[in-house]
Image (cartoon, rainbow, N blue to C red):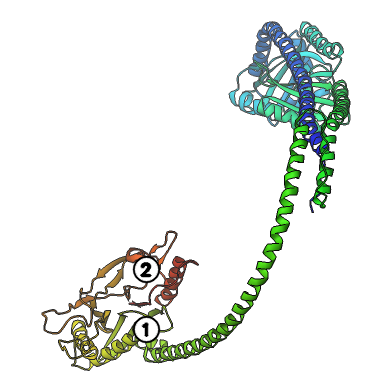
Amino acid sequence: MKKRTTIQRQITLNVILPVAGAILLIAVLNYFRTHNLLNESESAKNVLISDYIKGLIRFQDYTLHLIEENLNTKLRDVSFNLVHDRFKDTEDIERADLKGILNELDLDAKLWAIYIIRNDGVIVNTTFAQDSGLNFFEFGDRFKDFFTNEVLKDGTFKTDRMGDEKNTNRKRKYSYQATLDRKYVVELGVYSEDATQLVQGIKNQLNEIAVNQSSVVSVDLFVGDENPLSFNSNKVIMDQNLPVFKRALDSKGIGKTYDKNSNHAYEFIYFEREQSNLYGHSVIRIITDRTVQINVIRRELIMLLVVFGVTMGILLWLIYIRSRQITTPIKKLAEKVTRITEGNLNERAEVRGNNEITTLSEKFNVMLERLEEFYNELEQKVMERTQEISQQKEEIEAQRDNLAKSNLELEKAYKEIEEHQERITDSILYAKRIQNVILPSKEYVDKVLPNSFVLYKPKDIVSGDFYWLAEYGEKICFAAVDCTGHGVPGAFMSLVGYNSLNDALKAKDNMSAAEILEELNKNVISILRQKDDSEAETVNDGMDIALCVFDKKSLKLEFSGAYRPLYLLRDSEIQEFKGDKKPIGRFMEGQGFRFTTHEIQLKKGDSIYIFSDGYCDQFGGPRGKKFLPSRFKATLAEISDQEISLQGDLLDQALLEWMGDDQEQIDDVVVIGLGIR
C-alpha cells in the first residue's frame, strides 16, 4: 500500500523544492562564474606578460641586428682568407696552429675564436679549448640540418644571429663556411661586449617580471627544439612538462599543465623569432602560483554553502508556520470524515473563519444531512429488493436444472461430432498415403532425371497439385500439374490427372508434347463425363499443366502448356515460354483447338523451371501482397549460381520468409527444376 502524506508536508515540499533548486542554481552559477573570471584574469595576465616579453625580445633582436651588421663584414673577410688561402689544402687542417693564425691576422684571441668542424659534426681543432671534441650534431636536428644542407652543400659564407656562448654566457657572433673540398667547416666566433650588456639588461627585465607579479613564480624564455635552454636563467624544463613544451612548439600555439602538489600552473607560449637559422623557435614559460586563487574559490564555496543553509532554514520555518494555519482546519475536517465513514452520520464539521475551508465545511454539513435522508430511504428499498431477490432466486434455480439437462445433451452431441471428425481425418490421412504412393519417389526422380529438384508443398493434408514423371521410349516426360481446387476435391482430381497422363502415353508412340496434352484432355473429359449428354451428370472441372518431353542425348526439349509457362534460365537471363490459354478438361474435342509444342535446344549451363500458380500467388511481404512472377524470376536468377539440387531448399526458404509469421499458405505449391550440366 502506498504510504500517505499530509497536506502540510506536501505544501512544504512543493514550495521549498523549487525555491531551494533556484537558490542552489544561482549559487552554483555564481561559483562557476567566479571560477571562470579568476581563470580568465590569469590567462589575460599571462598574455600581457608574453606580449611584453615578445616586445623586449624584438627590441633586443633589432638592436643586435644593428650591432651584427658591423661584425658581418669582418667575419666574411676573415672566413674568406682562411678558406681560400690558408686552408685551401686541408691535409694538415686538424693540426694547424690556429692561435698563431689569429696573431698573424692581428685578431685579439680574447675576442676571436676559430673552430675546425669535420663534416661529421665533430670539432677537431679550435682556439677555444673548452669546445674541443664537441659534436655539433648533438645540439639537435635543426643544427644538423643547417650544417649539412646549407653550410656543406652550399659552400658559401653563412652567419646566424648572435647567441650565448654557454661556458661564459657572453654574446658571441658565429659564422660558418665549408672548405673547398667540403671535408670541413671553418667556424668563426667573436664576442661583442655591447651585445652582452644589452642582452644582460633584457634578462634582468625578464627576471624582474616574476618579482613584480605576486602570483608569478618565474618567467623564462626557452630557445632550441630538442634541448631547450633558458635565455634568462639556468632553469630547465622538467621531464613531466616536456610533452606540453613539445605540443606548444609543434602546434605553434599554447600548451598548459597544472601541478596539484605545488598548485603551480605552467603555460608554454610559442614565439617565432625572425632572421635566425638556428634559434628561430622560442617558447615563453610562465609559472603561476594558484594558491591564492584556490583559496578565493574555497572561500566562495564556503560562503555559498553558508548562505544556502541559512536561507533554507529561514524558508522552512516560514513555510511551516504559514502552512499550519491552512492545514489545521483541513485536518479537523478529515477527522470528521473518518468518523462518518465508520457510520456516525450525526457528525458535523466545525464551521470557523471566513475562507474557502469555511465554505467547504458548510457544504459538507449540507451534504451529510442529505446523505442521512438518502440512507434511510435506501434502507427501506433494500428490504423491498431483498424480497424480490428471494423470489428470483427460486426461479433461477429452476432454470439451472433445465440448463444442466441441456448441457448433457450438448455434450453427447459434441462427442458424436468429434468421432465423425476423427474418422474423416483418418480417411484424409489415408488418402494422403495413397497420393504419396502414386507420386514418383525421390529415388526414382534422382535416377530418371538427375541434376533436378522437386519442391512439393500441399496446402492441406492432401494436395490438388502434383508432379508427374515417366520414361517415354528414349525420352523423359515430366509435368507440374495444378488441378481445380485443393484439399480433398483437388486430391481426387490429382488421381484422375495422374492416371490420365499415364493412359495418354499409351495412345501411340513418339507423340509430341502437344499431342500428349490433347490425349490427356480427351481422357479427362471422358472420365468426368464432360460431353454433350443431357442425361448424364457432368463435372465442370479440369487442370492446368506444364509438360516437358526431354531427350537427354540431343538435349532437345519439347514444351506444351495449358495455362502454365516454362522458364529457361540461360546466361543469368530468364526466357519465358507461355502455355496455351486453354485448360485440360474444359473444351471438347473437335472444337478446332490444338495445343502448341515449343521446341527448345538446350545447352550446358541452362536451367529450366515448370511450376503451378501456388508459389507466385502466395501473399506475404511487408504489405501482404502476392509474390508475383516478376519476384519469382528475380529469385531464380539470384540462386542460379547454386547447385540445382540445393535450389529447391532455397526456394522453400524464400517462400517461408515471404510468408513470415502472419500469413498462411493459400494454395498447393509444386516447382520442378532441371539443370543441364
Q: Quadrant of residue 37?
A: top right
Is 80 in front, or is 280?
A: 280
| Numbered disc in front, either 1 or 2 | 2
Q: Quadrant of residue 78?
A: top right
Residue wearing tag 1: 450
Tell me if mark 2 has few (under 14), some (14-19) or many (20+) residues whose alpha carbon lies within 10 angstroms of its own: many
> In 3D space, how far apart are the residues under numbered discs 1 and 2 (Cα atoms)?
19 Å
In the image, taking residue 464 as reference, residue 394 lies left or right, namely: right
For the C terminus, give its image quadrant.
bottom left
The amino acid marked with disc number 2 is Leu
- Which secondary structure, mark 1? loop
Q: Nearer the viewer, residue 303 or 221?
A: 303
Residue 91, visible in the rendered structure: no
Q: Say left or right for 321 vs 585.
A: right
Asked if residue 348 shows in the view, the reply is yes
Can you identify the residue that label 2 sits on? 636
Looking at the picture, tell me which residue is in the foreground, 455 or 590.
Answer: 590
Task: In the rendered structure, find residue 141 and report the number of the disc placed on it.
Answer: none
Mark 2, secondary structure of its residue = helix
Q: Quadrant of the N terminus?
A: bottom right
Residue 487 as seen in the image, left or right of residue 558: right
* Amino acid at the residue labelled 1: Pro
Residue at 75% in and 33% down: 359
Q: Position of residue 381 (x, y in %)?
A: 69, 59
- Residue 436 horizontal/vertical position (percent): 41, 89
* Horizontal and vertical percent position of residue 477: 28, 85
Indicate whether 172 appears above or below 463. Answer: above
Disc 1: CA contacts within 10 A as few (<14), some (14-19) or many (>=20): some
